[in-house]
Every structure is written in structure tokens, then in C-alpha cells.
Image (cartoon, rainbow, N blue to C red):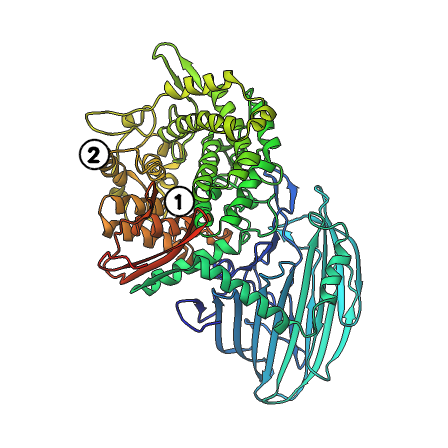
Amino acid sequence: MTDSPLWILHEDAPELDKRQAHQETIFTVGNGYLGTRGAYEERYLNEMRTTMIHGVFDDVPVVFTELANGPDWTEMDVLVDGQFFRLDQGSLLAYERSLDLRSGLHRRYVRWRSPKGHTLDLTFERFASLADPHLVCLRLAITSIDYQGPVEVRAGVDGNPDNAGVIHWDWIAQETRSDAAWLYLQTRASKVGMGVAFRLNGPNGASLQGWDVHNHPTLVATAQAEPGRPLVFEKTASYFTTRESRQVVADATGALTRTPEPAWDALWQPHSQAWKKEWDACDVIIEGDDESQLALRFNIYQLLIAASRQDETVSIGAKTLSGYGYRGHSFWDTETYMLPFFTYSRPELARKLLSYRWHTLPGSRRKAAAGGFKGAQIAWESAATGDEVTPSWVTHPKDRNSLVRIWTGDIEIHISSDVAYAIWQYWRATGDDAFMIERGAEVILETARFWASRAEWNAEREQYELSDVIGPDENHEHVANSAYTNYLVRWHLRFAADLVVWLSQKAPETLTRLEIGSSDLRAWRQVSDKLYVAYDPQTHLIEQFQGYFQRKDIRIADYEPRTHSIQYILGIEGANQVQVLKQPDVLMMMTLFPDAFDAQTLQANYDYYTPRTDLSYGSSLGPSIQAIMACKMGRVDEAYENFVRAARADLVDVRGNVRDGIHGASAGGLWQAVVFGFAGLKFGPQGCQTQPHLPSQWRRLAFKVQYQGKTISIDLHGSGTEKS
């Protein structure tokens, strides 16, 4: 562990009521199996007390399914002379909270004077073991300043956690002893069982007892406080679900039995070593800009605690495991924004994340068939099975009594090619032929079949088209020939045809298994060769979608100052009629295919779309991509401005919605902005190359990437020189 401020997230005063939910999100701890928000151990009004475990979905009205909030392991009440410790009672004399990003240690120190006038120091520490993902640990040290008498600590596990009012669990069984307890629950619809075992250790001489409260077993330790003598209490818990175990209670209790008492030191050493290995592979060093350094490490940390190291049947939701936003569903955010970080830093985890799409192909096939199409269509929002779980209606943002129709699940279809691109990118970076043969090819070819059946022939133009779609820019719905969508589909179909040729030589049995024939190849080549992609050779502009240039052109500057997006200000229909973009699809397309467009085309489209993009309050996905494009244009100041927007998305709560969870796509995009933007990292026939455009205050930028099984160290200095 280090005390370096470039690794430590600090909070110097409790953000009660005002920014409480925001702080809970950014102080999340996790280990890729579970994520626990930074709620206070002693509870507080309006908290969002949440522990989410990958893959534990349950049905919910309107939105189909959501990650079920699990029993909380951090609950710990403290009674001093019969009074509960609470931040809103008595006097708060000192306060400091921190999250050590290097080790995932959440720490809170409080000097508190009780309403009766007793002064004590309390230090809470917690971590979720990265070495054993089923284990979590909490330690409390209490030191009296002027009080002598009993201190009681109550540590429970509540079997009725809720998702903003919705309870997903039924009680099955429990057992409570004086020093340990377990609880067995089951989700109400999906029937996922969960076993939680926990124990409480107190200081020497403490008395221990168990309260067998129905669905809320509680362990109690009582010790005598004396001024200056620390009292240390420790709560250790173990989680298992029926997704990975047939005997969840036995496994949960067994994990605790095998763990020494007290457990902190025994668990901490392998945990901290596991984190050291992660940071040795994933750290990015920025010298000369402390805010950027801390923000980048914070975002990398959030990605690392969200990725499962054991389970390849789960993905990362748009809000990771840190909040209720989007109900834990996965979008294109994972493959397009988060996955490159894993592909080039932790390819083993990237493989698992991509395997999720292979495991959920049956759901994608059902979605395609429901629309009357062939092959597999990847759901816009995906959960446990790969079936479409996008809600059709949500509450209107300005009128809580009315609903808004959500079309993304019906017509935002580019995700099928986004996933294919991510698989191709992983394959190119790793050379993992086995993955492509056994899994990746099936996803790519089955989704290619979908595209061939989805494309529409326009006899008048003698071209294929894709009508009634939504591009990544969700300000505009029901458009035809989205440039981003069509370009990705054209690439997808061409790559699918090339992949068939490769498979015919390397693994012909795969083609036989998938029943890929000459008719598939003809269809893919025919559609890709004649698919509509707009380009004006005189202006070098690529039209965002057909008819975009005919939309009303307004100046975003005319709406300043503001604290909301242009779509919020104009309304959904109003935003649909103007050229303002939630995010610039054409520029996004160009970042994915950096060598496919000449300098004039890059410049023309950057100059046209940048002033029409709502970078301040539009999509959190936009600023990082804008930063990459600005670097390509040599506009480093503009790149840095957008990088800072992305860096502050969660830490500063720019859009006011961090209470719902971490912006996972922005976190991944921030890493891409540094590596592909400021460092200008490229991979080609000559291997790895950089074209750096460092901000003036950055004295040094250093990181590692994995490519073709080798570790490549990049070390750039402010002059643009590179040292190996």
C-alpha cells in the first residue's frame, strides 16, 4: 500500500444528503465477482446500500430483468453507553475517508463526540478480496479519548435488500451461533440461490452472542473501552450463488472455516499481491498533471473491479457493479469502449468478456427470428440470456406522470457489428486462433447472416439500405442509412467473407458445423459491395444519416449557460429536428478505422461535426472519442479539454447522474484517449508505433500493452521522444 496522493481518492467531509449517493458510487469496492457501494457501515437516511454480484438477475416489471441487490456485508452498528454512533447525531470533530486505488482499501476515520459527551476515534476499513473473490473483510478500530465503559458492535446481514423499493429475495433458511451465522436466500423469479456466511471477531475479553432474527441474523460483540486502548472488531463474510455452486451454504461456511481468525492479515497479503500484478500490467503514468493521473487510475480501477476473472458467462453492465443504472444490462459500451483496455492490458479478461456474447447467442438468435430475420441479432440491452431486455417505455424526464417510448431495443442495431469488430480487434491483438475458431467465428458469421437478411434493396438506386434505425447518436430516431451503422455493416460482411476463406484452410469443420455455404458468401459480398454509404467528394463530408444535412442547423452556444443536454432543453422531438448530436457517429467511425480515410476527409468531418456535438451534456461516451480525433487533427488543446471532460465525468459528477453508477464506457474511453489519442499508438505490419501529441503540461506518459503475446513498454516524454 502507498500513501501517494496520486493513488488515493479523498473525502474530507461527509457529503450527507447533498452528494451522498455520488460519493457512494465513487467509493465502490469490488473484485470482479461482486461490487459494494461506499455506503456507511452504520447506515444513513436515503442511502443506496448495494452489493451486486455478476449474473444474479431477477425479473422486474417494465424493464424485464435487473441485477438483484444482494445482502450487505458492511452493516455494522456501534453503541457507546447505549447510544448509536451516527454522523447526524452528536458532534463530528474530525472526518476523513479514502479509497486506495492501488489496493482497493476503503478507509474512514471519524472522531465523534456522542450526545452524552463521550469522545471516540473510529476507523472503518474494508476490502473485497481480489485473491479469493468470494471473501470480503471489514475491520473497525475504536479508541476512546475520554470514555470508560461498554462498547457494543452489532454486525448483521439483512435478507431484505431492495432495488429502489423492489425486493428480489425469498428467505429459505438460516442459522446463527454466538460468533458466526449464515443465510440462504433465493431470487423470486429466476430462482438463483445465494448463501452468505459471516462471522464477527472482537478484542480479547469481548463477549460474543448471536441474535437469530428472522432473515436478519446478527452477531454482537461487547467490550470494555478504556481511554487510549484500541478495540478492534472484524467482520468477515463469504458469498456463493447457485450459478457457481451446488451447495452454497456449505461452500460459504467452509470458506470461513478455512480462513484464520482474525482474518484480515491472512486475506490482505494475497489480496494486495493480486492488485500489484494488476497494476504492474495496467498502470498508466502521467507526470506533470496530478488531476489527470489520479482520474485515470480511478477509471482503470473501476474497470478492473468490474471484470470477472472466473466467469465467462457474464459481461460488464453500463454502470458496472456500482449502481442501479440500466439495471445491470450490457450495451455496446462494453465491447466498443471498455474492451480495448482489457484487450491490450489484460487479454485473458477480454477473452472472457467476449465469450459472454458466444454463450448468449441463443438469445441473439431468438431476437433475429422474432424480427423475421436470419442468423443472430445481438440485443441492444442484454442480461443473463442474451434476449432483448430494453424497456419499451420509461418515465418522461420532465413529467413523472407520462411515459416515453424507447426505440433503441427495436432499431438501434449497430451493436451486432460492434461486437464483431471487438472480436476482430482481440484476434488481431492476441493471435488467439483457438478463440476465433471455437467461438468468435460463430458470433461473427451468425450476425453476418442477420445483416444479409436485414438489408433492403432499393431498386431505384440499385443499392442496399438500412432504414428505420438509430445510430449511436440517439438524438435522432427512425433515420435511414446511418453512416456509422452502414459503414460497420459493410466492414462486417467483408470481414465475414474473408474469415470464411481463412476457416476453410484452418478449421473447415467450423464451417461445416455452422452450415456456412457459398450462398452465404454471395449474399455477404453482394450486400457489402452495394450498401449505401454517403460521401461527397467535393466537400469530403460523410452525412451522419440520410437527410441529416436538411435538419435545422442551430448554434449550441446560443443555449449557454446551461446545465442540461440540448435534447433535454428541446425535448425528444425537438432534438430530432435539428443537427445537434448527442455524439458524433462519423468521428466515432473514423477512430475505429483510422487508416481508411485521407487527411482531407478527416479534417472536413472533424470541422463540421465538432461544433454540432453536445460534448458538455450529451453522451458521456462522446468526449473521449472527440479527444482521440482532436489528437489526429493536431489540436492538442481541444483534445485535452475533452479528455478532462471524460476524466471528471464521475469524480465531479458532471451530468449529475453518478448516483446511478460509474460510467463504464467513459472509463474505458478515457484509457483509449490516452493510449490511442495522446500517445498515438498504432499497430501495423511493422508492429507497434506511436505518434505522440502530449499536452504541454505532461512531462511523461508511460504504459504497457500486450500485443501478440508480448509486453511492450511505451515511455514518452514531453518532447515527444520515446524511451523503451
* Disc number lying in front (1 or 2): 2
Callout 1 crowding tier (Cα within 10 Å): few <14, some 14–19, many ≥20 = many
Q: Residue at x 37, y 55 (%)?
A: 647
Q: Residue at x 47, y 40 (%)?
A: 427
**Residue 633 located left or right of residue 415:** left
Quick check: 352 above or below 44?
A: above
Query: Circle 1 sits in a helix, a strand or a loop, which is it?
Result: loop
Q: Which residue is mark 1?
A: 621
Q: Residue at x 43, y 23 (%)?
A: 468
Closest to the observer, 605 or 147? 605
Image coordinates of residue 141 in percent, x first then y, are: 60, 78
Q: How many marks?
A: 2
Image coordinates of residue 299 in percent, x first then y, are: 43, 56
Quick check: 513 above or below 88?
A: above
Image coordinates of residue 278 in percent, x first then y, are: 49, 59
**Residue 380 located left or right of residue 245:** left
Q: Which residue is mark 2?
A: 600
